[in-house]
Image (cartoon, grey):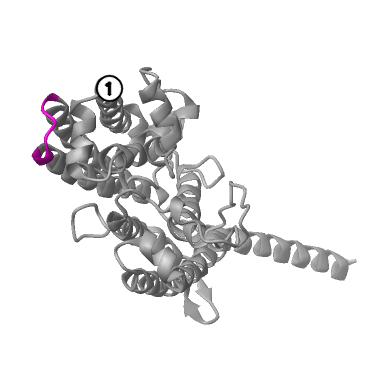
Amino acid sequence: MKKFILLFFTLSFLLVSCKDDDSSTDTNQDSFDRGAMLTHWADNIIIPSYANFANSAAVFRTSAEVFLENPSVSNLENLREDYKAAYIDFQSVSMFEIGPAETIGFRGFMNTYPTNATAIENIIQSFETPNLELPSSRDAQGFPATDYLLYGIADSDAAIVDKYLNGDQATSYKTYLDKVSKRIKDLSALVLNDWNDAYRDDFVSNTSSSSTGSVDRLANDFIIHFEKYIRSAKVGIPAGVFSGNKEPQTVESYYNPTLSKSLLKEALLASKDFFIGKSFGQNTNGPSFKDYLDYMDAIKETESLSDLILNKYQENENRVEELQDNLLSEVQNNNTKMLDTYDSLQENVILLKIDMLQALSISVDYVDTDGD
């Protein structure tokens, strides 16, 4: 009997000890300071990025007003420069489709391409005022529509200016450009104001390690942006990866294709900088996905997962650098390089979407129709 009682207490002690050990292990496995990372993201990356873009959008809008008041080749050239600057700055905020940006469908209204030139012309030729608040008008506004209005409506700069000066539709062309440029400015200011208002605190305080937590949600936004809006939209779709045929008409900045590589480079750089927690416009880093992976000692095939991802980012950048500035011409004349770039980006999709999310115990919350 004494032996039985002794055995009972021994087993009970072992069970309690095992339970305590398991709890300690779970705590050590992931006690990473998500709140500090969210604070850094909000205050040093997201809000400064939106502030920079809102400023660029406002400058672009002012140039549009000057051009509309006095259409000339000189004012058109100035407007184009400010448009290009704003378009490039947009690449740094495109991945942050969360909170106010998600609520209004910011990215879709800003950069759905290819633009629907036929719909734009139908509105202009019928002297209608465009209703750009309709979801169905996403492909007839934003930067792609501006691309068409500044580069695609005629074959020369003088002829483009003439569209805004003479003819029955001159007022309609002015109205459309006025509406598009104003909406870019207004939406960028709206998102920035909401971040500076209540949403910043809501975002930072939501440290839950669940599908509704800010880290999990932004991790998915970050990856879907890399997968769908960099890998697929900027490279894969024009190269014909999914259709089996080249689709040069889907290149970003189609009417001014010499800008297309710059947009791709900027988007890729913004993605890498966010992964390492680089403060916007500065050379300092803060808590990041890279730090989180290192904290979790994430390893793949004996190598640091964060190093593998960074090395792949470098390879991605090298592939992009090998492309000519005009991606429309690249698709038409040397599509193999576009396909090679896609393959390199795809390898990073796997590291980010599968390996990183698994290491951080984050579930994918979007539907993948292209495969991994």
Q: What residue is shown with label 1?
A: 175
- Residue 94: within the magenta? no
Is 30 rendered above or below residue 142?
A: below
Q: Residue furthest top?
A: 128
In the rendered view of the protein, which quadrant contains the N terminus? bottom right
**Magenta-highlighted residues:** 69-74
Question: Percent x, y for residue 303?
Answer: 48, 80
Question: Percent x, y for residue 67?
Answer: 14, 31
- Residue 72: within the magenta? yes
So how many labels did they put on this image?
A: 1
Question: Percent x, y for residue 159?
Answer: 21, 39
Label 1 element class: helix
Q: Residue furthest right?
A: 1
Is 193 rendered above or below residue 1?
A: above
- Amino acid at the residue labelled 1: Thr
Query: For this rendering, which residue is in front, 25 or 47?
Result: 47
Is 144 rendered above or below residue 350?
A: above
Which of the 4 quarters of the picture holds residue 326?
Answer: bottom left
The structure residue drawn at horizontal position 14% and vertical position 34%, both measured from the top left corner, is 63
The structure residue drawn at horizontal position 19% and vertical position 43%, both measured from the top left corner, is 157
Residue 281 lies left or right of residue 263; in this view the side is left
Question: Percent x, y for residue 262?
Answer: 28, 58
Query: For this rendering, which residue is in front, 247 or 285?
Result: 247
* Residue 272 shows in this picture: no
Residue 36 lies left or right of residue 300; in this view the side is left
